[in-house]
Amino acid sequence: MRNRRLKGVASVAVALTVALAAVTAAQARRAADTIKIGSITILTGPSATIGVETARGAQFMVDYLNKRGGALGQKFELESADDANNPQLAVQAATQLIQQDHVVAIAGPTNSVSGIAIQPLLAQASIPAVAYQSGAEQLTATGSPWQFRSNTTLPHHFEALTSYFAKFKHAKRFAFIGWNLAAGQSSLQGTQYAVAHTAGTSLVFQTTLPLTTQDFSGVISQAKSANPDVVLVGAPMPFAGVLAKQIRESGWNVAIGATGDFVTTDFGQFLGPAANGLIMTDTGHYKCALKRKVGKPWVTAWQKQFHRPPGANEIAGADAIGVIAAAIRKARSTDGQKMVDALHRMSYNGIRFAEQWDAKGNLKHTPIPIVVWAKNGTQLNNVMCDVQPVVHLKKP
């Protein structure tokens, strides 16, 4: 009897082992059926709208690519994580994506400081990352071979913005108000560089403030006393929207410039008529994408699903995913080193523009759209799709 009971227990144990092995094998097969790409962006906190829009574009691109066959005979799967614009949380997010979700690459983060913070993890795991809107030059100045951009740097954007105002609006005197983190400092550096290399222009006022600033009355008064022709805003929402609105509410009709790196779909809704005439560079614009053979069908598919044009952050999110997918196809592998090597060899024919990378992971050359906000604060017009930073001086 005892032997029969032992045999019965053994049989159950064997059956459980076989069953668990079958479950593990099934999980492995399912995992092998998809190529997992991680996404780190800002989904909570003051700048969450930027991240939500970026993530929406990234997920749409995954679905769009999957409908066209994915890569290497597999479909893509997006694993999203929130860093709340916090470098420490970005490290936690990257750890989860790499160690638990087993992603082969990461799109993001949005914040340059967060991008720098995850670089040791990328190196340890041999995982490449393609940043979303991260524009601070420090991101690729660290020498990390695993970090790439999908956007032009913020200095380039503010060089182009300054150049545009000087050339087309005949502006001479510039003021700069931005946030006091890496992206704000890079924006200021671009403005300073452009002014130094544009004859007849000067930077008459400059300051950087915390992102959480709500009352700009004092700094507006100081800037106004310097009598600038243009105020350049180097900060995201809500900073950018609150500052622009308070400038208009103060009765000051100065020209205002900003960059679409920081602007979201709620920007115009927040400003309303105060957005009239505001000029900015953009990370991308659907009107420019519609002029491209690759961009036109993508925008058409987006409009079919969402019944509206895509915003700049949504397009930027999509292109970051597109870069990773193109690298996988070029490498014919999901091996990190092979993907990195492919990125340095390839040209990505994207929604917004064709991209190539230098040895540091910076874009070699991309056009920068300049757009003008219309009176109703909900649409853009007068789009210039190819403005270059200060005659494209020495920067790549």
Image (spheres, rainbow, N blue to C red):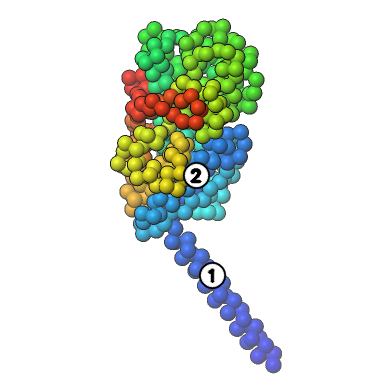
| Count of numbered tags | 2
Q: Where is the C terminus found, in terms of image quarters?
A: top left
Q: Residue at x 45, y 16 (%)?
A: 192
Residue 297's x, y, as percent? Answer: 35, 45
Q: Secondary structure at mark 1?
A: helix
The residue positioned farthest toward the bottom in the image shown: 1
Disc 2 crowd rating (10 Å Cα; few below 14, some 14-19, many 20+) is some
- Please say whether residue 216 is visible from this viewpoint: yes
Q: Does residue 331 appear to the left or right of 171 in the view shown?
A: left
Q: Quadrant of residue 165?
A: top left
Residue occupying the far front of the picture:
376
Q: Amino acid at mark 1?
A: Val
**Numbered label attached to residue 56:** 2
Q: Amino acid at mark 2?
A: Arg
| Secondary element at image label 2 | helix
Please provide percent x and percent y for residue 104: 45, 51
First in sequence: mark 1 vs mark 2: 1
- Say which residue appears at 64% left-offset and 23% top-offset: 214
Mark 1 Cα shell of 10 Å, populated few (<14), some (14-19), many (≥20): few
How much space separates mark 1 and mark 2, taking CA atoms? 33 Å
Residue drawn at 45 percent across, 35 percent down: 312
Q: What residue is shown with label 1? A: 23
Q: As drawn, is 186 to the left or to the right of 369?
A: right
Q: Quadrant of residue 92?
A: top right
Q: Nearer the viewer, residue 289 or 394?
A: 289
Q: Is residue 240 above or below residue 172?
A: below
